[in-house]
Image (cartoon, rainbow, N blue to C red):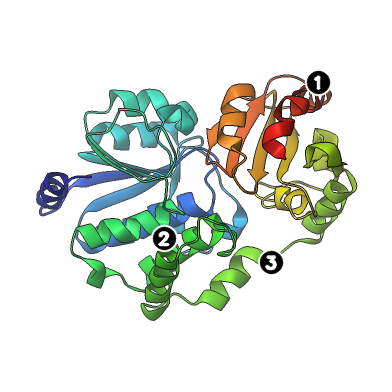
């Protein structure tokens, strides 16, 4: 984002605007944290703002200030469409390809509003007038913090904004343990704590309120864990029947893939989750070092993401998807070692 871009955005925000903020489908902690953080900032500047998510998100994110104002496109299509059509500005956060918004894509393509992209994924599409893209930054929530720095308005960060951005940074860095966590990240987080983010309370709300069924599902997932030592790879699978057995709710499988990656000598991990209603198998990939799961997901499973964290999908059956995955691994032996 250039200095001229910032000057123009400042001018746009000088007078009240109708603004829509959109995260990706199946929003995670960074998507909700970044959008609500920006929402609180813009509301304080007297703009008419609404966050519209493509669909629902995990219950462990539904305590965050402002969450009750979020509109879900999937359940409120007519209202969402009208808000997008009438918007003067649309911020798209934590994604950089409009197909990541699912059923919202046609409305966003048609929208006459000026679009502003803030995201840290590689290879952004050319759909926004203003683009703030940086793959070296750990989370979109940290980018929102830097965006406010660019606007010379860090002083505007209050407890609500700080809490939202802390949630996004914490979740997208695996509680600050991933390699993407830099010294700058820690300085940003320190400032957010100084501005009111209660780190212990946030961690408890996100990670330490498990249901019995969710822990039982984790047990089944770990029981399904398979390891290929010769490929330094581990994977977990969960069928639709297993999800149903343990009363699966959105977000219940969050972070499970990391158990595979925690095994000694494993550098590549995946989780395969069957979703019969959508007719797909959803996949999450994680890696250590320089094994590029973004490229792996793009090449084989209609996905993408970051070098060490990516997602994908398969329209094959769960068994066929696993067979495909296993058959591909020998081609990557050199990279995995």
Would you place residue 246 above or below residue 85 in this image?
A: below
Characterize the local packing of mark 1: few (<14), some (14-19) or many (20 or more) Cα atoms within 10 angstroms: few
Q: Mark 1 points at which residue?
A: 320
User: Which quadrant is the N terminus positioned in?
Assistant: top left
Decide if residue 77 is on the left or right side of residue 233: left
Q: Nearer the observer, disc 1 or disc 3?
A: 1
Front residue of 162/44: it is 162
Assign a secondary structure to mark 3.
loop
Q: Name the residue under label 2.
A: 66
Would you place residue 284 above or below residue 326 in this image?
A: below
Q: Name the residue under label 3.
A: 209
Which residue is located at x 59 percent, y 23 percent? Answer: 299
Which residue is located at x 23 percent, y 41 percent? Answer: 89
Q: Which of marks 1 and 3 is nearer the N terminus?
A: 3
Decide if residue 241 is on the left or right side of residue 305: right
Q: Distance between the residues labelled 2 and 1?
A: 42 Å
| Number of marks present in the image shown | 3
Assign a secondary structure to mark 1.
helix
Would you place residue 337 above or below residue 332 in this image?
A: below
Q: Nearer the observer, disc 3 or disc 2?
A: 3
């Amino acid at each position: 984002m250039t200095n001229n871009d910032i000057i123009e955005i400042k001018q746009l925000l000088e007078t009240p605007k109708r603004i829509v903020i959109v995260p990706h489908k199946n929003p995670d902690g960074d998507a909700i944290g970044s959008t609500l953080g920006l929402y609180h900032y813009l509301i304080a500047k007297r703009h008419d703002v609404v966050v519209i998510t493509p669909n629902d998100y995990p219950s462990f994110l539904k305590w965050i200030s402002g969450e009750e104002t979020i509109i879900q496109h999937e359940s409120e299509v007519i209202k969402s469409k009208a808000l997008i059509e009438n918007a003067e500005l649309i911020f798209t956060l934590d994604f950089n390809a409009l197909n990541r918004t699912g059923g919202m894509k046609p409305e966003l393509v048609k929208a006459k509003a000026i679009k502003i992209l803030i995201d840290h994924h590689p290879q952004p599409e050319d759909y926004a007038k203003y683009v703030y893209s940086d793959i070296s930054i750990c989370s979109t929530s940290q980018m929102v913090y830097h965006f406010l720095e660019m606007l010379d308005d860090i002083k505007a960060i209050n407890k609500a904004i700080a809490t939202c951005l802390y949630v996004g940074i914490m979740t997208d860095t695996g509680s600050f343990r991933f390699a993407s966590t830099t010294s700058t990240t820690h300085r940003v987080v320190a400032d957010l704590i100084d501005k009111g983010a209660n780190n212990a309370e946030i961690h408890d709300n996100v990670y330490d309120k498990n249901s019995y069924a969710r822990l039982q599902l984790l047990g089944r997932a770990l029981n399904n864990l398979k390891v290929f030592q010769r490929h330094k790879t581990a994977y977990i699978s969960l069928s639709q029947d297993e999800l149903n057995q343990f009363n699966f709710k959105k977000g219940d499988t969050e972070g499970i893939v990391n158990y595979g990656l925690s095994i000694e000598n494993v550098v590549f991990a995946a989780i395969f989750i069957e979703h019969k209603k959508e007719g797909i198998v959803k996949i999450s990939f994680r890696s250590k070092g320089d094994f590029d799961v973004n490229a792996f997901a793009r090449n084989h499973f209609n996905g993408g993401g970051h070098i060490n964290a990516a997602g994908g999908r398969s329209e094959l059956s769960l068994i066929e998807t696993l067979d495909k995955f296993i058959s591909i691994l020998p081609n990557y032996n050199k990279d995995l070692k």
